[in-house]
Amino acid sequence: MHINPDNDINVGFMNKEIQKFLIDHMGVVDFELAPIKKGGSDRSFIRVSLPDKTSFIFMHYGDEVAENTRWVDINKFMASLDINVPRIIARDESLHFILIEDLGDMDLWSQRFLRWEERRDYYFQALTQIYRLHSFDLKSLPAGLQLSESYGPGLYKWEHDYFLENLVWEVCKIKLSSLDSAKLMKELDALSARLQKIEPCFIHRDFQSQNIMIKNSRPVLIDFQGMRQGCLFYDLGSLICDPYVTLDDEERNELINFYYELLNPAYSLDEFVYNFWMGSVQRLLQALGAYGFLGLKKHKPAFLGHIGNGLENLLTAIDNAGGLEMLTDLATECETILARKNY
């Protein structure tokens, strides 16, 4: 075993149990380890490279987030739907170890500077993949497959509070009056009620560009452990209003129309588009709360750099959804404050 000297790996983490796990399942003792520093979860990833240039990814997940324990079962479920997910090589459930195929370093986010004509098909393929999940019959969920809490009044409210606490209060330092807070909650409750009227389905819940790897010119979905029942427009908003990637109006409309034709719903495109913007508002509230939480409380300041794009996308979504005047004013105030802080 060799530790790549060019990488700041925590040697203490590579204890005897991990070494034994890798040796047992790869059948070799000569390999190089390099950490992969990405994302905001409590999981650790290490690239394991063999002398013949074959490589794998070792994942160790902690106890901080219960949904991490569901990753393997959800992986197998999604694979059964012909959705591209990482191939599992080996696992040790008691030690929280998983060895999976190496998907490389190319994700949809890394392609963001290519011309639209060069990356459009990746988006189409990704939407086709997620449609297979969205169109699965909820009543046919395999017995024993545990999922996280479904979207309903409680989870929608939690995301609203998450946004207010971690973005509005902690990052922007805005404190609402009791009257303004009540008006805002009324708007957000109406948003939640609207989304709950839409027929639920299974959703990825973090369907954005950094969770869509590209291997052999096809998208492979990762970070799906938060899969649950929810609103498909939450997923669509995650990808099409992704703060990590800037899409123009024409590109967004092309993707919206593509998915509408896939879904072929019994309602108009106008209603579909309206639902899309409502779902996008909800998703962006969650994402902005996450950026504040990860940036300040988890001491990962890089996430703070995405707040500006997130607020811009939120204001676009609010403008298209309509009826969210208090949220418009609040997001605008946040944008003004953060412009002074150069976020």
Image (tube, helix red, strand yellow):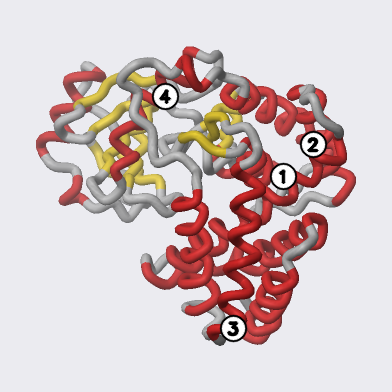
Q: Secondary structure at mark 1?
A: helix
Identify residue for label 4: 75
Q: Amino acid at mark 2?
A: Leu
Say which label, 4 or 2, has the lower sequence index: 4
Identify residue for label 3: 179
The residues bearing labels 4 and 1 have C-alpha atoms spaced at a distance of 24 Å
Identify residue for label 1: 240
In the displayed structure, 218 sits above or below 117; it is above
The residues bearing labels 3 and 2 have C-alpha atoms spaced at a distance of 39 Å
Q: Which mark is residue 255?
A: 2
Say which label, 4 or 3, has the lower sequence index: 4
Where residue 281 appears, as percent x and y from the top left, is 67, 56
Where residue 246 appears, as percent x and y from the top left, is 75, 53
The residue depicted at 20 percent of the width and 50 percent of the height is 11
Task: Bin the neighbour count of mark 3 within 10 Å (Cα to Cα): few under 14, some 14-19, many 20 and up.
Answer: few
In the displayed structure, 196 sits above or below 164; it is above
Say which label, 3 or 2, has the lower sequence index: 3
Q: Quadrant of the N terminus?
A: top left
Residue nearest the viewer, comparing 76 with 116: 76
Task: Bin the neighbour count of mark 1 within 10 Å (Cα to Cα): few under 14, some 14-19, many 20 and up.
Answer: many
Task: Bin the neighbour count of mark 2 within 10 Å (Cα to Cα): few under 14, some 14-19, many 20 and up.
Answer: some
The residue depicted at 38 percent of the width and 50 percent of the height is 41
Q: Quadrant of the C terminus?
A: bottom right
The residue depicted at 34 percent of the width and 16 percent of the height is 143
Q: Secondary structure at mark 3?
A: helix
